[in-house]
Amino acid sequence: MRRLWLLFAQAVTVCIAILFVVTTLRPDWLRLAARTDPRPGIPVDALGSGAVDAGAVQQAPGSYAVAVAAAAPAVVNIHTTKRVSVSRMPLPADPALRKFFEQMPGFNQQQQATNLGSGVVVSDKGHVLTNFHVIEGADEIIVALTDGRQAVATVVGVDADSDLAVLSIALTNLPLLRFTLLEAPRVGDVVLAIGNPFGVGQTITMGIVSALGRTGLGINTYENFIQTDAAINPGNSGGALIDTQGRLVGINSAIYSKSGGSLGIGFAIPAEAAQTVLSQILTFGYVKRGWLGIEPQDMTADLARAFGLERAGGVIIAGMLRDGPAAKGGLKVGDIIQAIDGKPVNDTQRFMARIAAKAPGEALELKLYRNGRLQTLSLTAGQRPAKPR
């Protein structure tokens, strides 16, 4: 018995010594032995020494870095300056005295006012799309690219009705953000806003499309806004709203705010509408829109009852130009428009937008109530007079 115990003790001592030597000199042998996987058909080495089973851990949210890298270089900063007259002292309330003081030499002094905004390079010829209100009245416009280059911009054309303007810069090898949107955005789609808020530098914010077709905001003559909760602040105007693929969705234009900062309600001009304005400005120098020379008014419940209608729908013609296209086509004051080209008319804003979408000289068909009877009238759209710059 004593002999067996001595043999066992010696064997244990030898094993411990071997384990000590292996651990000290070749620890990778132990790690290789421990790398086993109970799942059949999966090579042990496929997991790697530091691999984690993806099925056991939830993956982190995706990144939009690729989309930003594709679109951000084409979004530029726009700096404008204009000279304004500032009186040296408060002007009197009396108009005659006010005019007298304003004409006095040296009473007013010239100062420079600056403004910041954003823009999007949309062609390799140096065309930059931005908001009209960003460059309105500017004496000098400087466009700054993300690669550090700057250039003085000239105005190619503006469209105050949609709050868009096209600039031109004399630079080469420009990054572009083309109009390549294959499908319209949907409510709930993730979007990214790129711009220069408060002049702090290019900034990316994320949100979703909150609503489509926003009108009646009193911002522009023709409105069809994309609403988003992506943070848009002063300085973002004219910047890009892109999707998660880096494609241009819209041009950031306005915010709803009581404090001057973002409250989660921002508005962008759809890319399709911006592309139409860009194309017409580059072709004609201005935007051609259909026009009838009328003054429509929304139908209310009281007006509907007064005209003997069962429901308040359509728009009523409250006035028109004597020699305008509508008057020449036989439309009359008091006519109640129910449909245009077979599509129902619900409100004045959309009705005027659909007329504006017509090319000058294009025919349109109106269904209307006149003297209690439903009639059909064919008209030819005229060209909306351009507003002076």
Image (cartoon, rainbow, N blue to C red):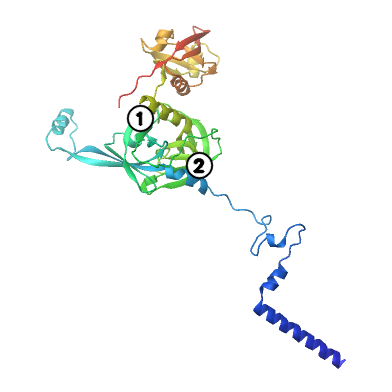
In the image, taking residue 197 as reference, residue 138 lies left or right, namely left
Residue 323 horizontal/vertical position (percent): 36, 10
Q: Amino acid at mark 1?
A: Val
Q: Amino acid at mark 2?
A: Gly
Residue at left offset 43%, top offset 45% = 73
- Per the image, the residue denoted by label 1 is 158
Front residue of this view, candidates 343 and 8:
8
Residue 162 horizontal/vertical position (percent): 40, 29
**Quadrant where the image shows the N terminus:** bottom right
Mark nearest the camera among 1 and 2 is 2
Outermost residue, left direction? 105
Q: Is residue 262 visible?
A: no
Say the numbered circle drawn on residue 246: 2
Q: Quadrant of residue 43?
A: bottom right
Q: Quadrant of residue 89?
A: top left
Using a 10 Å C-alpha cutoff, classify the residue at mark 1 as few (fewer than 14 neighbours), some (14 to 19) or many (20 or more). Answer: many
Q: Are marks 1 and 2 in contact (CB under 8 Å)?
A: no
Assign a secondary structure to mark 1.
Answer: strand
Using a 10 Å C-alpha cutoff, classify the residue at mark 2 as few (fewer than 14 neighbours), some (14 to 19) or many (20 or more). Answer: many
Outermost residue, right direction? 1
Residue 302 horizontal/vertical position (percent): 48, 17
**Quadrant where the image shows the C terminus:** top left
In the image, taking residue 109 as reference, residue 174 lies left or right, namely right
Front residue of this view, candidates 41 and 13:
41
Residue 246 horizontal/vertical position (percent): 50, 42
Residue at left offset 69%, top offset 62% = 45
Residue at left offset 48%, top offset 37% = 248
Cα distance in 3D space between marks 1 and 2 = 26 Å
